[in-house]
Amino acid sequence: MITLAELMKGFVVKQLGRIVQLACLGLSIGAATLARPASAGPTLDAVKRNGYVRCGVSTGVAHMSAPDSNGRWSGFDVEICRAIAVAVLGDAERVRFIPTTAQSRFTALQSGEVDLLSRTTALTLARDSTMGLTQTVAHFFTGQGLLVRRQAGVEQARQLNGASVCTTQGSVNERTLQDWARTNRIEVRTIAFDTAPSVLAAFLAGRCDAITNDMINLAANRLAAPDPEGLLLLPDVIMKEMHGVLVRNGDAEWATLTRWAVFALIQAEEFGITRANVEEIRRTNPDPNVQRFLGRIDNIGVGFGLDADWAYRVIRTLGNYGEVFERTAGRGGLGIDRGPNRLWSQGGLLMSWLWQ
């Protein structure tokens, strides 16, 4: 006769066996899941199918995103689009640049007309939470300021009490200026126009006393004026701004890929890798972190469905973040000091996440 103790012992052994089997099955499923690449996502699939990235840019901001007389686009924001095209398609020229105004840019992205926005667009709470958009990464740190005529004798923004200020429709600049004016107990009147060239034309025609925008646009406005020395960019920064890539909600894979394409430019500068030395470093540098970044060991592209050396291709084609900045926004273009757009190790705000 089987005793109650023996019966219970047999039951416990059987249940333990089932638990072990389930645990082994779970480990197998988990390992298989980790081994498989993540789903590419609908936008990346569409980009590969189309053979190009559709990039929403501005209607023309010098050295940020503007076409030349032959219709070729160039500038900092354009380089970000090209970096993504190189990562995904292996070719910096496989981009279609679609001009958008401050008013039309979000509709173009929401409707699927473009695959991403890379233009002078501030990253804000409202845009992240109420517009069906994802702000993937900040890649340019700036602030909102004011541009005036030098002959007006204005040296500080607080001297603009009672002034009229031109700005861009559909931007956050109008609200920010009014908030700043209330805080400083002065009154200003804003006049909004649809494009940056329209804002500058109105200012030069005497329709307003100043222009307010981010420092990038103001520097471009000044350079585009017939007499740049006759215009003064005031030292006041009335609101911080950070610009970055925006994509549609609901496609986490595409958002992640665009984020890491920007990080590739930053990480290359952290490693001291340039367009000129990337081949030699890839061949001779023994640091496993560098070799992983350049696709020699491990496959850091598997989660995106990309080749292991996608970051290497980006740097070989465009260079690192510092190179991109200097030939567009920096000394080779707008002449803006890098300031907060320096690496974290140099007192700036730029830092890549870990390539692990």
Image (cartoon, rainbow, N blue to C red):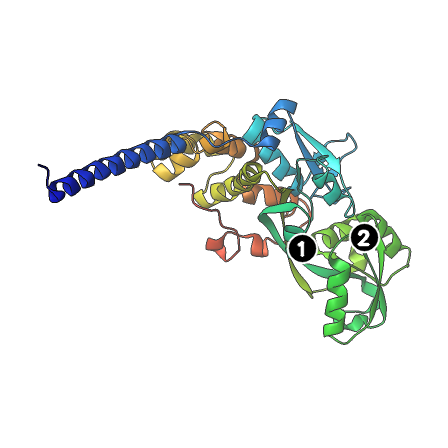
SS under mark 2: loop
Q: Is residue 173 left or right of residue 84?
A: right
Q: Where residue 192 sits: x, y (%)?
A: 84, 56
Residue at label 1?
Answer: 126
Q: Is residue 73 left or right of residue 266?
A: right
Along the line of sight, which residue is nearer the eye, 229 or 13? 13
Residue in view at x 70 percent, y 41 percent: 110
Please state which amino acid type lies under the numbered disc 1.
Answer: Ala
Compared with residue 69, is residue 154 higher up or lower down, i.e. above or below?
below
Q: Is residue 233 visible?
A: no
Residue at label 2?
Answer: 169
- Where, by quadrant of the figure, is residue 328 drawn? top right
Q: Where residue 41 sits: x, y (%)?
A: 56, 32
Residue in view at x 29 percent, y 37 percent: 23
- Looking at marks 2 and 1 on the same chain, the residue that comes earlier in the sequence is marked by 1
Q: Residues within 10 Å of mark 1 (few under 14, many from 20)?
A: few
Compared with residue 288, is residue 139 higher up or lower down, i.e. above or below?
below
